Every structure is written in C-alpha cells, then in structure tokens.
Image: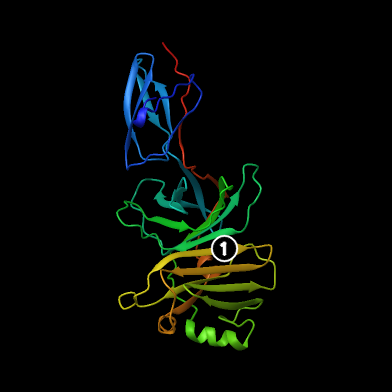
Amino acid sequence: VEGRNGFSAAAKVGQPIVLPPPVTNQEPFDLRFETASSRIFVVGGEKLAFRSAEDGTLRIMADLPERSVSLQDHDSGQVAPCELIASRPVWKGEQLCVRWTLRQRDGQFTARPTLGYFLLQPLDRSGVEIGTAAVCVGSADLPGQPLPTWEFLIPAWPGTAVTARVQGWITNAPVTADGAESCAALLEKQKTDETWQALPIPNIGWQIRHDGATLTLIERYDITTTEPKVWTDLRWDRSQASHKLLSIERRFDAAHHLFVQTWTFDRDLAPADIAGLQCEFTRLDRLRAQGWDTASAMLLPVASEKLAIQPVPVMRR
C-alpha cells in the first residue's frame, strides 16, 4: 500500500495494514498484490478486503459496517414487517455519531415513524459495562435519505468503550406531551422543593439545575428500573433566540436510579433566555406500548480513529 507523504506499507496475505487517518476529505491509496493493482480513495471508517473473482482478477471489496436487528410488536411479540439497520458508530470531533435506518423487509415504501428510542451501553474489550448508558430519543428526520433515518451525536463517550450494546423501540403513535412547564417556573420551584412532580407518576421525582450555558434535568426513581420512564423535550422559539444549542446529552444510570438530561448552549443563559424555554414531558411507556421493540440487543463496534485494510487469502485457480 502506498499513499501520501511517502507512506508505504506491506504485509502478508491475511495480515492487516493500518492506514494513517485521512487529512483531507478524500485521499488516494495505491494497493498492489503481485501483478494486480488498484487506486482507492478513503475518507475514514472503511474496511476493505482483497478477493479473487471468478475470472481470476483481483477485486477490492467493501465490507459495509452495518448491522440489522428484527423488530417485534410490543404487545403480541409478532415479528414486524420492518427491520432496523445500524451503521457503525463513528467519531465527529469529540462526539460519537450513531445512525439507524428503518427498512421494509420486502423492499416496499417505508413509512416514517413518529419516534425512535435507543439505549446504548458502553462496553470495554472484555464486554464489561463502562459508565452509564446513553439515551437517544427523537424523530427519523435526517434529510436527504431514501429511508427513515435517525442520527444522534453522543458527547463524552468513554474512550475505552470499543462496543455499544443497543436496545430500542420505534412507534407510530402520536407524540403528544403529557405535561409542560416553563423552565423559569421549574427553577423557582426547585428553590423550595428538593424534588418535585412533573407528572403524576408514583416513585419519580424531578430536579432541575442551571449552570451558565447548561440546563440539566434529573429524574430520580425510588424503585429499580431498567430504562427511563419519561422523556423531556426542551422547546423555545429558535427564530427569536440568539443562543444556539450545541449538544444534548441523555444518560441513564440504572445502579443509582437516575435519568439525567443536559442541554448545552453556545453561551451562558440569561434570565430572559430561561424565560423562553419550556420543558415538555412525555411518558415513554405510553408510546412504547403502541410500537415495535428490538427483538434482541445489538452489539455495535465503535470505529477507531485509524483505518484498517484487512486482506483475506486470495485463491488462485
């Protein structure tokens, strides 16, 4: 393999060659095996293999980093007509980018669901859980895609977590909030009450924190639970606001019975900014009861910053 700045590497068949991370959007590499050669352009995250075709020519095949999982009806357990396709998570700056696509098994048109929910638990190389699970909730609204597609950016993904264990569900139920209140009113309530009720649900108390450019909402559970019960969406008039949202981080800590949601903006929030923010609370169990669950947990490898080309043995006829 030969590339930019005099890069050159060789390996026996079956041994990987690790390429340096691309600097530009696309970079050329020349691959040679015996008398065969080819030029490819990489952008990062690809996995390629040498394979011999029927006519004896050498081809470079792309190993697409995707996984699929079946869906089943939440109540009946019957297999759903759709499946969920997960792309391999990749890094975008300091955030981990995750993407899922919904596809009809028979190839027909796939209707866009109203909401998707995904719980990602970081795992190390031994399969041991690291830290708390990341929660992604939202609509499949990634533009320019032929199928309904979700894309989320996860801040603070552990650097030693090489795999994500994913479980989730999707729904076509109308997404309507079960309750709403202004953030200013909630912060005033927090001054006198250690925890308060956003919705009349037993065994759950809420807390809210404002610290500079961040707003954090905490759900505390008095009982053991394997997933969050209520999702909070932060609303404001973006056409009038001068502050911009940089990231949303949702973390579920089953061991300590906590669901923490943090919104980070590009500058400190002034009282006038807080006055324009509203929390909308939606019961996830109500939406899930009308949806499809993943039939099993899905393990997704997390892409490293380097690109590996792993050749497979080439058989000559």
Q: Nearer the viewer, residue 203 or 261?
A: 261
Residue 95 percent coordinates (x, y): 47, 55
Residue extending farthest to the front is 5
Residue 54 percent coordinates (x, y): 36, 17
Asked if residue 202 is positioned above or below residue 94 in the image, the reply reads below
Q: Nearer the viewer, residue 156 or 80?
A: 156
| Residue depicted at x 54% and y 87% | 188
Residue extending farthest to the top is 317
Asked if residue 29 is positioned above or below residue 127 in the image, the reply reads above
Asked if residue 304 is positioned above or below residue 235 in the image, the reply reads above
Q: Amino acid at mark 1?
A: Arg
Q: Is residue 292 left or right of residue 139?
A: right
| Residue depicted at x 59% and y 78% | 207
Q: Quadrant of the N terminus?
A: top left
Q: Which residue is mark 1?
A: 251
| Residue depicted at x 53% and y 57% | 156
